Amino acid sequence: MLDYNQPIERARPEAPRGKPQAGFSVLELANLLWRRKVAIAAAALLGATLAVTIGKSLTPRYTATAQLYVDPRELQLVDRELTPRAQDVSGMSMVVESQARLITSNSVLLQVIQQAGLDKDPEFGGGEGTSLMSSLLGLIGLQPRAPSAAEKKEVQLAALDALNRHITVRKTEKSFIVDIEVWSTDPAKAAMLANTLTNAYLAESRNSQASAARRATNDLSGRLKELRERLRNAETALATYKAQNNFVGTQDTLISDQQLSASNQRLAAARAATMDAQARLDQIEASRRTAADAGAIPEALQSPTIANLRAQYADARKKYAEQAGELGPRHPALRQTEKQVEDLKRTINEEIDRFAQSAKNDLTRARDFEASLNRALEAQKRQSVQLSQAAVRLRELEREADASRDVYQSFLKRSRETEEQESLNTSAARVIGEATVPQRRSFPPAMSLFAMIGFIFGAVAASSWFAAAELMFAGASAPAPTPARPQRTPAPDATRAPQRARAPEVSEAWPPPQVSGAPEVEQAPPELAAPPLQPSIVEKPLIEKPLIARLQEADVIHTLGAILATGGSVDLTRLGWPTLRPGFPLTTLLNAWRDMRAAVARRAGGMAMPVIALVGTGETTGRSVAALNFALAAARDGTRVLMIDADHQARSLSNKVDRRGKNEPSRLGWLSIGSKDAREIKTVNGISVLPAAEGDAGKAADAIRKAITQARAAGGYDLVILDGPAVPLSAGGRKLLDDTEALVAVLPTSLDINDSLEEILTTLGRAERKLVGVVLDELTPAAQTRQRGRQYA
């Protein structure tokens, strides 16, 4: 427990226990390498020279690249193509991959070897032995023998294997573009081989299409003779069967069917004529039986003979009527006229009887004709039934003939199409970029890279050698370890009880320092090796107790900000405040601050940008100095820090940083709190500073919270450090601390530490659980002024 009544002692280095650790610290290793700097530099130069020599001895390679567009959707010159096209994307990709593999096939590469004469090129394994042997035999006047077929084949295979190693085919993702890369020791040869390879591939593609069409034509033509013979046999059998069964007709109808249809129509007409004759006869007979005038029938009215007789009959009747009025009943003239009237009437009746007899004759003839047609129709029906039974086999023969005809016509048409496709090129592959002569070599890389690699390798090898040698010599001469005496810790004064039961507990690994009335400047503590960023998770998975760090004079350096301030850019180490020594090895202070940030990261639970607030009592300048050095330590480890002045009353940090002129707008960032004067300031130290906002505490706190939310959404920072708010807290300051993930208390040693911590804990209230560390500020106000004998930078 941290007892507020107990004086705080200064931390003493813990005595070594057990066996001393083997190896070097970072400082010892740096001192060793500095002592051997001349030898290390010589080894580095030697390594660079050796690397450049090796690079110069390597044979240069030049790579030429040609580009092909391989479209699987070939040109559609005919309705039916020889090979079906790929419809889906995966099928098209497989076609392009296959074409890319076809480029490096043996058939294509053998054409390149033959066209470019690579079997006689020494670079591809040909022509060396032949040319040497020819020269030797030429010296003695003999002609070299011609190489055998086996030797030619062997040389060709060697050139094929070498050409395969010189070619690289790459397919661009999600496209139909294929890059063909060919390297050679001669740049012109590399370009020539790349172009020859593309031309050979296109020629091979055309030849393969023509060969496929030729094979299809030959296969189809071989089947045409058999199909033609099959069609001829089917048609002959059909014709013979028709002749045997009297299937004679025109177009699609047989003669028997035509005759049956015609007889049926004639029978219907005969029946109609019979019925008409019967109706006429019935009408004549009915007129004769009735007392009506028999000459009123249509035939009598239409007969000119009847009309003439009826006219004579009318005249005689008229004459008889006239004589009957003038002559007596027995007068001869009257009797003659009466006889004439009767003769005319009898003649008319006889004429009508002839009409009736004619109607009877017509009816008899119509009935006889109908009967004859009926007999003929029955005979044709019997013949049609017989033909229908024979038509079953006829239709079967017709189907066989039609099927044979369709197959033969289909094969014949397809054979003609494939024969024409032999001379058509449907491939859509084309060269979109011919290979040009490369101007720069592709291997080896630049000599500067060789020199850099050799320089680094030589320096690392020499440093490793000196470190290993020093380690072996130190291990051989190291004395036996002596046991260390344990130190006694003074017991706390039991007469005074702790004033606050909830005071934070501090780990024993960080004992509090002893403080006297007026703190003095001490010597710098021994420099330690850089510890890991996070403490051991096995021993302490979660740090609950606040860590203690001491900000001493040995950790900082003083600057004269008014004299050394540089023009356009803001340097946080040139503000006139004591800041961390630049380039200084890790000390106890930096390690403690690292542990605090690690504890904050664990408490934040993976939050992208945790917020740490530094609070303190008394003079606010000391708190601002501690917050500035805390931010510089985080930026030293590569953390992107956003520092916000949350003390809108004192504005110590804002007054120091915000001294820019009106002609310096480049330092202003996009983040702001309320007005343009409170806009983010970029610094050269990797820290962005957001000055304090204007207005009351509540509005300033709300503006800071809004700025933190915007920065967290933008994702431009890893850590936010708040300088403040000042104690005692206002309502806005307390709301601001509720949004922070951790708190660090700054306790000036010029005041009573226990009283200061008690005041801070009382002010924080429930927020004291966020306290992750305590910074003991041993930089008194007197130490922050110019003094004689101080070191200034």
Image: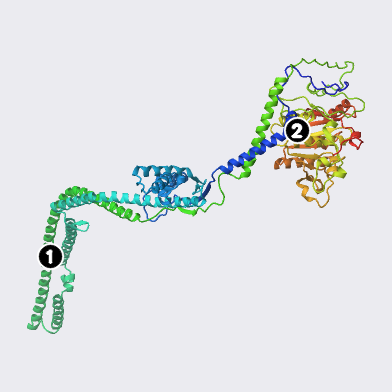
Residue sitting nearer the eye, 411 or 696: 411
Query: What SS does tag 2 mark?
Result: loop
Query: What SS does tag 1 mark?
Result: helix
The quarter holding residue 348 reads bottom left
Q: Is residue 441 among the parts visible in the rendering?
A: yes
Q: At label 2, which amino acid type do we have?
A: Glu
Within 10 Å of disc 2 (Cα), the crowding (few <14, some 14-19, many 20+) is many
Residue sitting nearer the eye, 791 or 425: 791
Residue located farthest toward the left when viewing the structure as drawn: 332
Q: Quadrant of the C terminus?
A: top right
Q: At label 1, which amino acid type do we have?
A: Asp
Give the answer, above or below, for where 702 lies relative to 378. above
How far is mark 2 from mark 1, CA to CA? 130 Å
Q: Find residue 279 and report its horizontal and vertical position in percent.
A: 17, 63
The quarter holding residue 450 reads top right
Q: Find residue 42 and report its horizontal and vertical position in percent.
A: 68, 36
Q: Is residue 324 left or right of residue 623?
A: left
Q: Earlier in the sequence, mark 2 or mark 1?
A: 1
Q: Is residue 318 left or right of residue 128?
A: left
Q: Quadrant of the N terminus?
A: top right
* Label of residue 362 in the image: 1
Within 10 Å of disc 1 (Cα), the crowding (few <14, some 14-19, many 20+) is some
Q: Find residue 299 and report its horizontal and vertical position in percent.
A: 16, 71
Q: Are marks 2 and 1 in contact (CB under 8 Å)?
A: no
Residue visible at 56% across and 48% down?
Answer: 441
Q: Is residue 378 left or right of residue 756?
A: left
Q: Which residue is mark 2?
A: 741
Q: Is residue 696 left or right of residue 75?
A: right
